Image (cartoon, helix red, strand yellow):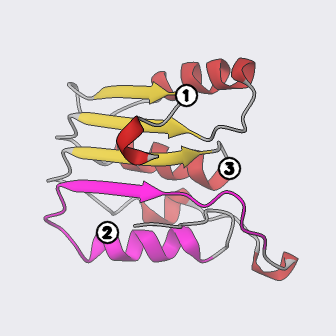
Amino acid sequence: MEWVWFGHKYSVPFILLMIRSSPNLEKLQLEIDVEVSFDESFLGSFVPEDYSNIMLEHLNEMEIIDYSHQENEVAFVKLILANSPVLKEVRIFMWNEIPKRKKVNITKMLLSLPCASPVVKIIVTFALPFWLC
């Protein structure tokens, strides 16, 4: 999915509805649009506990491009990690505008999240590879 904006109050529930409708999903790739602005009435967060029944039994790989560490992004990543027992690899490419010092702290936090999969490899990078630019 391209141009996803996690700050919109309906974006994460919509994405999770699509995921729930795809029980055999093996790969998930999200490209976040961090520079979109909406009226205040469209902003909001979601409650991860409302989606605890989502089980991603086939998800092997997840990739997030332009991760900016918004509240909904963090909650989404936590939810996916906690409910994906066969997840093998997660690649998170941070948004370029985040200061380097903050990127280091975010990386530490992401690497310490609990995971349902005992073999998941979480890769956090500060720059996009040339083929995604």
Q: Residue at x 56, y 18 (%)?
A: 108
Q: Residue at x 16, y 40 (%)?
A: 86
Query: Which kind of residue does numbered mark 3 sit on?
Result: Glu
Q: Position of residue 104 (x, y in %)?
A: 63, 18
Label of residue 32 in the image = none
Q: Is residue 13 magenta?
A: yes
SS for callout 2: helix
Quarter of the rendering occupied by the N terminus: bottom left
Residue 92 figure quarter = top left
Q: Position of residue 39 (x, y in %)?
A: 84, 80
Quick one: label 1 or label 3, which is nearer the N terminus? 3
Which residue is labeled 3 in the image? Answer: 71
- Is residue 18 shown left or right of residue 110? left
Query: Which kind of residue does numbered mark 1 sit on?
Result: Phe
Q: What span is colored magenta in the figure?
A: 10-37
Closer-to-camera residue (54/89) = 89
| Distance from the alpha carbon under mark 1 to that under mark 3 | 19 Å
Which is in the foreground here, disc 1 or disc 2? 1
- Is residue 47 shown left or right of residue 43? left
Which is in the foreground here, disc 1 or disc 3? 1
Q: Position of residue 9 (x, y in %)?
A: 66, 73
SS for callout 3: helix
Label of residue 19 in the image = 2
| Distance from the alpha carbon under mark 2 to that under mark 3 | 20 Å
Which residue is labeled 1 in the image? Answer: 126
